[in-house]
Image (tube, grey):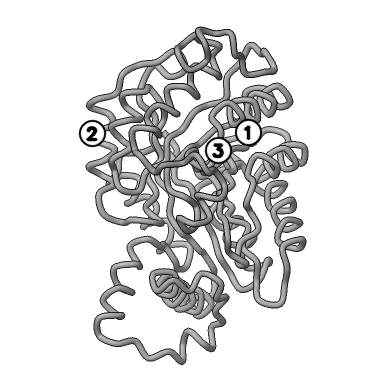
Amino acid sequence: MSLQLSVLDQTPIRRGSNAAEALQESIELVRLADKLGYTRYWLSEHHNTITLAGAAPEVLIARLAAESKRIRLGSGGIMLPNHSTLKVAENFKLLEALYPQRIDLGVGRAPGGDRITAQLLNPSNTFDPQEYIQQISDLQDFLTDHPNYNNIQGKVRAIPQIDTVPEMWMLTSSGESAYLAAHSGMALSYAQFINPVGGKDAIAIYRQRFKPSAQLTSPKASVGVFAFCSEDAHKAEQVQAVMDYRLLSFEKGRYDEIPTYEAASAYKYTENEWQRVLFNRQRTIVGTPDIVQEKITALAAELDVPEVILATFAETKEDRFRSYELLAEIFSLTANVEK
């Protein structure tokens, strides 16, 4: 079976740009991804940072779905503890009503930012993992109109009432949620771009323990990774240098820094920092088309998944878009769609 590729858009804001321009770029990118044959286009939820524009995936999904024809639109993901479960169900039932069988609801339990911000987003959030487990159960029941204790045995319904259900995905980077996804009969997406260790085991456990649900009869999995492709090897090296610096900066809590290649190349790493850089490179796939094709294919084979979701950062919009074009070419995505 041909490998499927999808897009994870974290709505990055470049140095000297702004949120409005970043969102307009997303509109252009979803049109391109739809045309090129990408399978789905996911949007992430982040808070309290000036480097990303995507605080509300459900709002942007509605806009981007209207700009495309066949590609699936979804959240990668909604950070469920930040929200009322009923409200999330109603948001995505409304999206599914507008764009039937094109909506994905990917959920996670990370805050999408710092803990203080998460507390302000949902003052009732106690950060108890058991509450997240209950939210997943309640969410499924709201989406499928199934009575349970927390919807007063069906007296509280998520509207609108529709005949289809958004495709439900669980996101994980630690592997813990693989057990919950299996128990709940949901699809699973492993975030290699967050944690490069444990994906193979997490997906294997998920497949072994999967229990069919009304929405999904057999296990379904994908992996997400930072990726950049260019015919220019020097440009790829520059992007790798910036990613090295950026990921290390995130680990130091510098979320608002938008690094340049000049700053990244001039930085002198300590020995310990360079070891972190080498570790973090497992979260990225960067290079010329032959190198990127080989590494993406190997990652999919290692984790035994038919789909890889790609998040791409680049100095310019043109470089970012060209990367997605090259990937579509080397994996023959347009041919797959035409078949």
Tag 1: amino acid = Glu
Out of 28 and 48, give the one closest to the viewer. Answer: 48
Element type at mark 2? helix
Q: Residue under label 2, please give it.
A: 205
Q: Earlier in the sequence, mark 2 or mark 1?
A: 2
**3 horizontally vs 117: left or right:** left
Residue 208 at x, y = what percent? 22, 27
Q: Nearer the viewer, mark 2 or mark 3?
A: 3
CB atoms of marks 1 and 3 within 8 Å: no
Q: Is residue 187 left or right of residue 235?
A: left
Q: Which residue is mark 1?
A: 338
Looking at the rendering, in which quadrant would you find the N terminus? top left
| Alpha carbon separation for disc pair 2 and 3 | 28 Å
Q: Earlier in the sequence, mark 2 or mark 3?
A: 3
Instruction: Identify which amino acid the numbered label 2 is placed on.
Output: Ile
Q: Tell me how far mark 1 sits from mark 3, CA to CA.
A: 39 Å
Query: What x and y, as percent, mark residue 18?
Result: 73, 68
Q: Name the one closer to the observer, 152 or 288.
A: 152
The residue labelled by disc 3 is 83
The answer to whether marks 2 and 3 mark residues whose Cβ atoms lie closer than 8 Å is: no
Q: Earlier in the sequence, mark 1 or mark 3?
A: 3
Q: Who is closer to the viewer here, 87 or 210? A: 87
Q: Amino acid at mark 3?
A: His
Disc 3 secondary structure class: loop
Q: For the residue carrying disc 1, how many other residues have a C-alpha within 10 Å: few (<14), some (14-19), or many (20+)?
A: few
Question: Where is the C terminus found, in terms of image quarters?
Answer: top right
**Residue appearing at x 59%, y 47% in the figure:** 43
